[in-house]
Image (tube, helix red, strand yellow):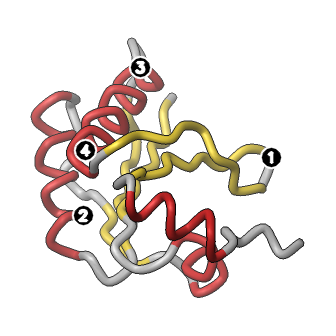
Amino acid sequence: MSGRVGKLAAGMADTLNIKPILTMQDGKLELLERIRTRKKAVERTLALTCASANGKAIQRVAFMHINNLKEAQELQSQLCNLLPCPPSAIMTEFTPGLSVHAGSGVVGVTLLTG
């Protein structure tokens, strides 16, 4: 009911090393894809982000994390090797409201294009 993952589903996802890719649509956090392994999830996130920016000028970029600054910085480095990122990227932690649904270790990226 709350939108949080049940204990059984979370246990199975953990056992199978499934990492969700989430997106924000119309102000709601939604599941976009499920990927096996963290490395593949980061690669897919980079591919989706590059596709989203395809041919558009990137005005701002922000990287978010939940207790995972190191991996957020790695995501920033990888993305900025693929796309022309503005020099002043935002690095911040997710809000507590999103943290409840996503859990510790999450990293994310958002672009403002024009």
Question: Is 75 placed above or below 14 here?
Answer: above
Q: Amino acid at mark 3?
A: Ala
Q: Amino acid at mark 1?
A: Asp
Residue lying at 61% horizontally and 63% vertically, measured from the top left? 9
| Residue pointed to by mark 1 | 26
Q: Which of pointers 1 and 4 indicates the residue nearer the eye? A: 1
Question: Is 103 placed above or below 42 here?
Answer: below
Pointer 1 with pointer 2, Cβ within 8 A = no
Q: Secondary structure at mark 2?
A: helix
Q: Position of residue 100 (x, y in %)?
A: 61, 82
Residue 106, located in which quarter of the rendered image? bottom left
Q: Which of pointers 2 and 4 indicates the residue nearer the eye? A: 2
Q: Position of residue 30 (x, y in %)?
A: 69, 49
Residue 66, numbered label: none
Q: Amino acid at mark 2?
A: Ala
Q: Secondary structure at mark 3?
A: helix
Report how far apart the C-alphas of labels 1 and 2 lie in the structure: 24 Å
Report how far apart the C-alphas of labels 1 and 3 lie in the structure: 20 Å
Residue 51, numbered label: 3
Earlier-in-chain disc, 1 versus 2: 1
| Residue pointed to by mark 2 | 72
Is 65 on the left-hand or right-hand side of 31?
A: left
Q: Secondary structure at mark 4?
A: loop
Report how far apart the C-alphas of labels 1 and 4 lie in the structure: 26 Å
